[in-house]
Amino acid sequence: YPKATLSASIAIDEFKGNTWGEKYQCILTDPENKTVLDILPMRYGHYLSKYFKEFSASDRNQVMYFVSDMWKPYSDTASVWFKNATQIVDKYHWIRQIIWAFENVRKEEQKKFSKTHRRYFKKSRKLLLKRFEELTDEQKQQVNIMLYTSPTLSTAHFYKEDFLKILDCKDRDSAKSAMADWINSALDSGIPQLQKCAKTMLNWLTGILNSFSSPITNGFTEGCNNKIKVLKRNAYGYRNFNRFRN
């Protein structure tokens, strides 16, 4: 099938296609002009290298932005084949790291409660995840009651709220300072889930900070993925990748 034409901005992501014996397929888009560039049969590093190697160096050097999630083969591919491109970690993907970390703390603490208490927490998880400042007074009271029952959960909630404040930073420098403070503090928190999250932030720090200096996100790509999943469902799946790609 014909090879894509590279654009100044490239976004890459995977979706569950279950075709040609591969669980995940890969989508390439131009996030600024909102067009799909190509659909690839797999997301592995060796395949991506083989694919991008076929483009001329001048074509690859024109790519200025490379947006992806936190799948390492993507960043490795960008480092090797798109040396002029600024690597951006999509905001949605790094924000959900703290949500996952907090959820893991909540689930662990919840196991220690009585059955009635556990049910209450399960129904109120959305309140715990939502930014505290966006809650009504009544909801804030509910959250405070829940946090009072577990010092560990209360600490994790504080770190979650503190992390989400980084999103309010207007530029890369202020985000860098706020993120450094949060990472150092989380590493000393004594809560394994938060420490793991802090290490992840540290490993991906450059790409995360680049998301503050550029408005480009993977939003269009995620929208395409949703449409692809609907098409796949309506067709009851595809065994043949080329038909699926068409």
Image (cartoon, rainbow, N blue to C red):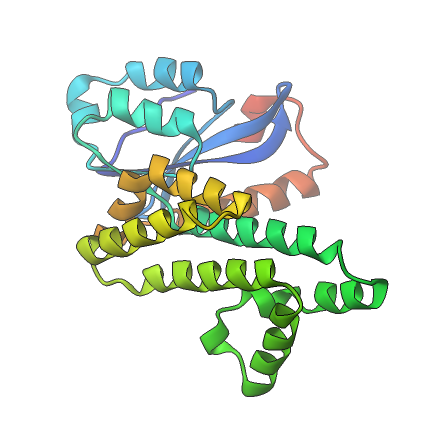
- Tell me where residue 19 appears, x and y as whole percent: 63, 24
Q: Does 37 sit above or below residue 220? A: above
- Tell me where residue 224 appears, x and y as whole percent: 48, 45
Q: Does 61 sit above or below residue 167? A: above
Count of marks, rendered view: 0
Quadrant where the N terminus sits is top left
In the figure, is residue 19 to the left or right of 122? left
- Tell me where residue 243 appears, x and y as whole percent: 58, 26
Query: Residue 233 versus residue 109: which sits nearer the camera?
Result: 109
In the figure, is residue 131 to the left or right of 9? right
Q: Is residue 39 visible?
A: yes
Q: Is residue 246 visible?
A: no
Query: Residue 242 versus residue 138: which sits nearer the camera?
Result: 138
Give residue 164's quadrant in the image: bottom left
Q: Residue at x 37, y 52 (%)?
A: 185
Q: Does 107 sit above or below residue 165? A: above
Q: Does 97 sit above or below residue 74? A: below
Q: Residue at x 31, y 41 (%)?
A: 205
Q: Residue at x 47, y 59 (%)?
A: 160
Give residue 28's quadrant in the image: top left
In the figure, is residue 84 to the left or right of 72? left
Query: Residue 199 versus residue 206: which sits nearer the camera?
Result: 199
- Tell me where residue 129 appears, x and y as whole percent: 56, 63
Q: Residue at x 32, y 45 (%)?
A: 208
Residue lying at the far bottom of the rendered structure? 137
